[in-house]
Amino acid sequence: MRLKMKSWILSFFLATCCTRLYAFEGIANILPGMGKIEGNVVILSKADLVSMLMAQKIYWDNGVKITVYVLPKDNSATREFLISLGIPPNAYFDSIENKYSSGKANVPQVLPTDISMALNVGNTLGSIGYIKDGNLLNLTPFVKTIRLDSK
C-alpha cells in the first residue's frame, strides 16, 4: 500500500507516471473552455482543486457550476485524497458543514461507491470527484482524469 501511495503521489503531482499504480484518481467532467484539457486529462492547479473542494470556487471559467462529489467520510480513498492535497479530512467535513449551514456553499454530494462516483461525474457537466479504481474510467466517455499542474 505504501508503494501504491508513493506512486500515486508522484504521478498525480508530477504527472510523470502514465500507469494507474496509485490508490485512487481525481476525475472531472468538463468541456474545452472550462479549463485546460489535454486529451483525456484535465490540468488543474492544486490551489484550484482545493478551492473547488472547499467550496471557495464554485464556477468553472466559463460560468458552469462546479458540482463536488465525495465518497463517505470513513472511506479510505476520501481520507487519502484529502490528505494528499494537504486537507485534514475531519477539518474538511467540518468546514463544509459550517459553510452549508451558513448558506455560503452547497454541500458536496456523498456517493456510496466508486461506480456511483464514476457514473455521477460522467453524467454531470462541471463535476469533480475521485475514485479508487481507475478502471472505472471506462464506464463513461465524459470522465477525464485530473492532473495537477506542476507549476
Image: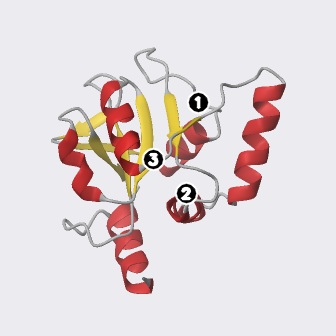
Cα distance between the residues tagged 2 and 3: 19 Å
Q: What's the residue type where badge 2 is placed?
A: Thr
Q: Is residue 52 above or below residue 93?
A: above
Question: Horizontally, is 57 left or right of 46 in the view?
Answer: right
Q: Foreground mark, 1 or 2?
A: 2
| Residue of label 1 | 57
Residue neighbourhood size for the residue with mark 1, other residues' Cα within 10 Å, grouped as few (<14), some (14–19), many (≥20): some
Give the number of the disc on residue 78. Answer: 2
Q: Is residue 2 left or right of residue 136?
A: right
Q: On the picture, is 60 further left or further right than 33?
A: right
Query: Residue reaching furthest front?
Result: 112
Residue 102 in the image, given as x and y percentages of width and height: 84, 24
Residue at figure coordinates x 70%, y 60% from the top left: 88
Distance of label 1 from label 2 (alpha carbons):
20 Å
Q: Is residue 60 left or right of residue 143?
A: right
Q: Position of residue 146 (x, y in %)?
A: 35, 48
* Mark 3 nearby-residue class (10 Å; few <14, some 14–19, many ≥20): some
> Looking at the image, is 77 positioned above or below residue 55?
below
Q: Quadrant of the N terminus?
A: bottom left
Q: Amino acid at mark 1?
A: Lys
Image: 3 above or below 103:
below
Q: Nearer the viewer, residue 88 or 69?
A: 69
Instruction: Quadrant for residue 96, please give it.
Output: top right
Question: Tag on residue 141?
Answer: none
> Mark 3 = which residue?
45
State the image coordinates of residue 148 (x, y, percent, origin top left). 39, 53
* Disc 1 secondary structure class: loop
